[in-house]
Image: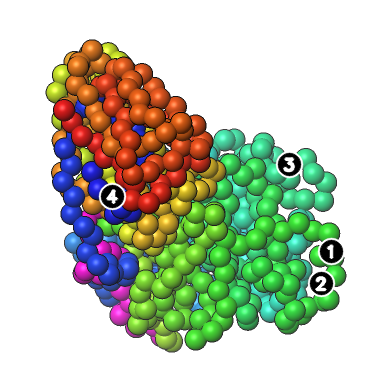
Amino acid sequence: MPSTLGVVPVALVAAAVLVATTAPAPAGAQGLALDTVELTNGLVLPVDVADPGDGSGRLFLVQQGGLIRVWNGTSIETTPFLDLTGKVACCGEIGLLGLVFHPNYELNGELFVNYTRNFGGQLQTVVSRFDVSAGDPDVADPAEEILVTIDQPAANHNAGDLAFGPDGYLYIPTGDGGGAGDPFENGQDLVELLGKVLRIDVDSPPDPGLAYAIPADNPFVGQAGAREEIWAYGLRNPFRFSFDRTTGDLWIGDVGQNAWEEVDRQPIASDGGENYGWDCREGAHDYTGTDNDGLAGCAGLTFTDPVLEYAHAGGRCSVTGGFRYRGDTEPRLRGVYLFADFCTGEIFGTVPRCDGAWESQVLLDAPFNITTFGEDSAGELYVSQYVGGSPAPATSRIHQLVLAAGSGGPDLLPSPAPLDFGTVEVGDTVSLLLTLENDNLGPEAAAAASRVFSDPVHFALDFKTGPASCRSGIGGLPCLSPGVSCAVAVELKATAAGPISETLTFDGNFVQEVVTLEAEAVPCSSDVNLTVSNLTVANGQSETRRACDTLTAAPDVVVETGGDLTLRAGTRIVLGDGFQVESEGSLVLEIF
């Protein structure tokens, strides 16, 4: 079976009949590009889009002036879901800024909002709990339970987002209190709640003197001189953040001062306590701008670098954090983190390289300002078209993000891909040899594939990849760089007897060259032989192995022209790291 590399440097051979037809990938396959499809219009200053997670198909649209509107799947309901216009101080960087529904909203009807108010002449951030009304799912009960209030010394840098983490706790980002250069020095001050990400428990009985409980595993619990609500710090204005619904990682878009915008990523395994650097640093750079105090107090501190940053150039000025795409409509976008610049309207996609670093590129240059992204229950993403003004017109819109027509190159490997194996016995093995090409923005881990197999037959799934460029992945996992194709052998071993007609599911943006796959299991006792041509073992001699034996090749095995290895059904070849291909050597599977 030919590979696009000219050889198939993987030899995982088993009791199977393998038939594969190949089709070359189109030359010059296009890169990914985004487009927008208008969802709805007629909004005033939209700043958030939230899904209630109740299966209703509705989206809730937050307007900065204090209204939450319901999009019912076709249009916006006339009656607002919640009207806070009498409480909210607006506009500029203040207003009704965030909405999140409780993870059990379908059962408890609870929702939470983040807004700014003027309370006796003091500007405050308020986080409150509301309930849906008993009689109408499209209208909230106006009764408010205030959970958090934070005095704001200035009218900018209020952050405003809200999100529940995979742990069930409510996460609240806060800005540094405003002004240029953090003049109040809140970012690095653990006594203050400003310039932080807070983590609170809204389901347990509240702690004394609070309207919420503090999780016992918060990083500063019991530490003198620190607020126990703090989960992370050193942030300037984390206006939009999100949790990756697949990995649980937290992504934070932190708006910069005058030079650098940054995106921070906190892995799910984090115990919290990260210091993202502000105002000692802007992005990954020492901060030397307005109100710089000579970096006094920054010496000896440990900072967590942003996963990516970009400079203020070409009109770029303010990052709008987004989401990693996890929907089904656009498979090539799966795993791509999308974010935007408010001023230019550029939407970026970022992916990890094989070395673990992240890189991004512009996927869409939208002709409008972007205040927020939204994610629905299916993982599809939306973006706001924010039209300002005083008074602001009702001409703002919400768009769904889709791939542009013709974007992305050849078709993806079907997921799930049907595989018909016939009847197998315990211990029987089926192998598939696939040639995969990564046509995504960045690398893909070949080992990220999963399987969906039903009773009564289960399989062990292995991935073997070819050249070193395919094997040097994050944590040692196989990794496909952009544009690289690799031969990937999949071994399926039956642990119970019975007929099989199952599916193999790939969780990755792989493009296939193998268009048709057919495999028929052959018992280990079968006399069918598989011949591997042009493989010379370490001593240069050809060998024959019995059915279901395993041949482990030494690290100095070299594939040259000539020499055969005949394998009985079920035999596997395990190649060492030093496996090489020389001259015009190749590895060919033939069925007799």
Residue beneath disc 3: 221
Q: Earlier in the sequence, mark 1 or mark 4?
A: 4
Residue type at numbered disc 4: Ser
Q: Which residue is mark 1?
A: 299
Mark 3 or mark 4, whichever is nearer to me: 4
Q: In terms of depth relative to the viewer, which is nearer, 498 or 402?
A: 498
- Residue at label 2? 295
Front residue of 63/531: it is: 531
Mark toward the viewer: 3 or 1: 1
Foreground tag (1 vs 4): 4
Of the residues shown, which amino acid type is indicated by label 3? Val
- Name the residue beneath numbered marker 4: 3
Residue placed at 21% from the left, 69% from the top?
Answer: 405
| Marks 4 & 2, CB-CB < 8 Å contact | no
Contact? badges 2 and 1 (CB < 8 Å): yes
C-alpha distance separating marks 2 and 3: 28 Å
Query: What is the secondary structure assignment of the residue under circle 2?
Result: loop
Kind of residue sitting beneath label 1: Ala
Q: CA distance from mark 3 to mark 1?
A: 25 Å
Instruction: Check disc 4: other Cα within 10 Å, few if <14, some if 14-19, many if 20+.
Output: many
User: What residue is at 23 percent from the left and 52 percent from the top?
Assistant: 513
Labelled pair 3, 1 in contact (Cβ < 8 Å)? no
